[in-house]
Image (cartoon, rainbow, N blue to C red):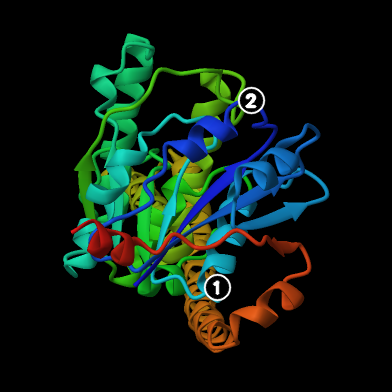
Amino acid sequence: MKLLIQIPCYNEEQHLAETFADLPREIPGIDQIEVLIVNDGSTDKTVAVAKEIGVHHILSFTTNRGLSAAFMSGIDTCYRLGADIVVNFDGDNQYKGEDICRLIRPLLESRADIVIGDRQTNTIQSFSPMKKRLQYWGSKLVRGVSGMDVTDSTSGFRALNRKAISKLFVHNNFTYTLETIIQAGNAGLSIENIKIETNSSKRKSRLFGSISEYLRRNGLVIFRSYAMYSPMKVFGSLAALFFASGVILCLRFLFYFISNPQVSSHIQSLQIGTGLVIISFVIALLALLADLSATNRRLMEDVLGRVRNIESVIEQESVSRSVLELESTTAKSWDSDKAIDQRQ
């Protein structure tokens, strides 16, 4: 059983060594542990520090592509490197390495496909009361649209097995946390939550500049992800709303016309109502086209998953050649089970 811990990094020169030192070298049930750094266009000495401290693999981008691209490229590379389990870990040492053992336990016991670390955001002192409420309602909204019982939807500390990795594809360029949960619900994956504690924050988030930006961008991600996989529900509901409104207005005109046929009143209700009914039919056609597009998307994602499976059978020595941005160092893997046996 091989575990790969991926750490997306953007200018984490000051925190990477501390983060790396906190990672577990041995975990019961894991034979091999390796660490992958995803260097998202860092302009500092992040790569030099990674090599110095003994990171096993470094995936580097020449420019900053964003958190979503770093996450997806990382798990794709981990998959091709033969990982049975991938743990996503922040480079600023926000999470505790000791929690990785508990995080992957449901995967080792085949109880879940994805495990998310619940930061218990209502207890984090650095979070303002408003941010705590937003986290609560945001997670509740994600639970509603995904059908998954997730208590901390924006937590980046999560573990995935090979089944989950092969089925997840992030389409937005902002964050992977919400979209992957909605995808997991539509792909039939199971999710489990593990309560964790976080270290004190060392810097402000680089993902967003203000609460309003966070709400706007995350709101769009949730709506787009839900509409992408359930277009008939979104556009069908909108079409039904327009149709019902149009029928009501048309009935209003009809009521007054029957009451007094000699007087042509409330013509505007008839005109607007007819227009709304026509618009509802147009939206219904768009819903049908969107549903067909969603079906094609699911088929394409299935094909991409099969391509990942094919690529994963390539020998590890050739992976670094096929992934031009990947550099594997001479650092030896941490042989977890062997180390535990020797200690015993």
Q: Is mark 2 on a helix, strand or loop?
A: loop
Is 164 displayed left or right of 43 in the figure?
left
Residue placed at 64% from the left, 51% from the top? 38
Point out residue 178 in the picture as x, y percentages from the top left corner: 42, 47
Whether residue 266 is visible, yes or no, is yes
Residue 148, quarter of the rendered image: bottom left
Q: Name the residue under label 1.
A: 81
Q: Which mark is residue 14?
A: 2
Q: Is residue 194 above or below residue 329?
A: above
Residue placed at 67% from the left, 30% from the top? 13
Is 96 displayed left or right of 219 in the figure?
left
Q: Which mark is residue 138?
A: none
Depth order, front residue of 236/21: 21
Q: How crowded is mark 1: few (under 14 residues within 10 Å), some or many (20 or more)?
A: many
Q: What element carries label 1?
A: loop
> In this figure, what is the number of numbered marks?
2
Point out residue 83 in the picture as x, y percentages from the top left corner: 45, 70
Three-letter code for the amino acid on which mark 1 is drawn: Leu
Q: Along the polypeptide, which appears first: circle 2 or circle 1?
A: 2
- Quadrant where the C terminus sits is bottom left
